[in-house]
Structures are given as structure tokens and as C-alpha cells.
Amino acid sequence: MPDRKKLYYRLLTIVSLLPIAAMTHAQLLDLTKAHSVNDLWVVNDGVMGGLSESRFSHDIEGVLFEGVVSLDNGGGFASLRSPIVIPMGTTALDVTVRGAEKQYKLTIRTDPSPRAPMYQADFTATPAWKTHRFQASDFKASFRGRPVDAPVLVFSDVKEIGVLIANQQAGAFKIQIKNIQSAGSTPR
């Protein structure tokens, strides 16, 4: 029996020395803070002649993004954007939102120039706060709404993040964004 006990403690020592992946979370954008709106901006379909309108405001629960999507004049989208820095090792993004039950897209860019592709992942807002988790594989690359081939998405390459409403959803919309966090696997 003593030999078994020695073996058990030896195995326990070996296992404790192995690097174990631990999930870590880092707050990337805390939109409950008043200063968080300083770097936000709106991009609507007016850049292409559309007539959609949107605005954002801040309260203690987050940034409220609202407006009206119009399909007139070839339009049909409204978006809110922000610069962002995502740490290396990030394997997922957690976004906490609530709003009108409509389909939205979380958008990210690795190159903020207007000629660069945008990566998009769909989600549906709910009236109650909900945290949506996005893996890199959830995002599809597009340019001006059309699918394109693009490099594999690496979160640490991202320079810009946003929320977009499109997909022929004419009418009023309202979504509130509380925060964006990174989730990652780091050796312990």
C-alpha cells in the first residue's frame, strides 16, 4: 500500500506542474462609463445616398444606439463603431446587450480603411440583458455587404468594433450595449 501512496503523490505533483488553461476575461469597452462615448461614431447608409438615421447617447447602463432604418434611395443600414485593442490570446468576445428583438451584426475590422473587408457575426437582441459570445469562426468577411475571401480572423489584429443593423429591417430600432469583454485561454 505505501507504494501506491507514493505513486499517487508523484502523479499529483506531475499534474500540478502541467500548464493548465484558465479562462481570463478582460474588459475591453465598458460602455457604462460616460467617457466611453468619446471615441464612438455613427456610419449610416447616407454614405451611399441612403436615408437611414441613427444616434447614440449614454446612461449609467450603457450606450443606447437608436434610430430608423430606411430602405429608400438604396439604403438600409445604420452602424455604431469604436476603435478597440484586443489582447493576444483572446479566443472569444463577450458582448452584453439588450434591445428591440431585431437581428444585428457585431462588426469588426482589422484594417479601418474604407476599402478593407469587414468581419460580421449575427445576433438577436432581447429586451433583457444578454451576453452573446463570439468565436473568431462566427465571423464572415464581407465588403459592402457581399461575401469576400479574406485572411483568417485573429482577434488581436482587430482595430475597430461595432454594431450594425441591416438585412432589410426597415423601421425604428433601439439597442443598448453595456460592455465588450475578451475571453481567452492563458497558461497558468
Image: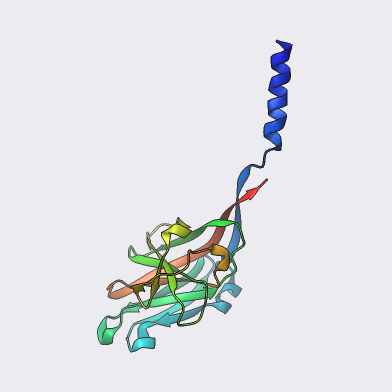
User: Which image quarter holds the N terminus?
Assistant: top right
User: Which image quarter holds the C terminus?
Assistant: top right
Q: Residue at x 68, y 26 (%)?
A: 11
Q: Residue at x 26, y 84 (%)?
A: 72
Q: Is residue 10 left or right of residue 94?
A: right
Which residue, as the protein is rendered here, is positioned at the far bottom? 49
- The x, y position of residue 152, in whole percent, is 48, 64
Q: Is residue 94 left or right of residue 101?
A: right
Q: How many labels sit on residues?
A: 0
Vertical placement of 119 versus 55: above or below?
A: above
Q: Residue at x 42, y 59 (%)?
A: 138
Q: Nearer the viewer, residue 121 or 19?
A: 19
Q: Nearer the viewer, residue 22 or 36?
A: 22
- The x, y position of residue 96, in whole percent, is 48, 60
Answer with the quarter of the image where residue 52 lies.
bottom left
Which residue, as the protein is rendered here, is positioned at the far top? 1
Vertical placement of 78 versus 126: above or below?
A: below
Vertical placement of 185 versus 4: above or below?
A: below
Q: Is residue 54 left or right of residue 171?
A: right
- The x, y position of residue 134, in whole percent, is 46, 58
Q: Residue at x 51, y 59 (%)?
A: 93
Structure colour scheme: rainbow
- The x, y position of residue 98, in whole percent, is 42, 62
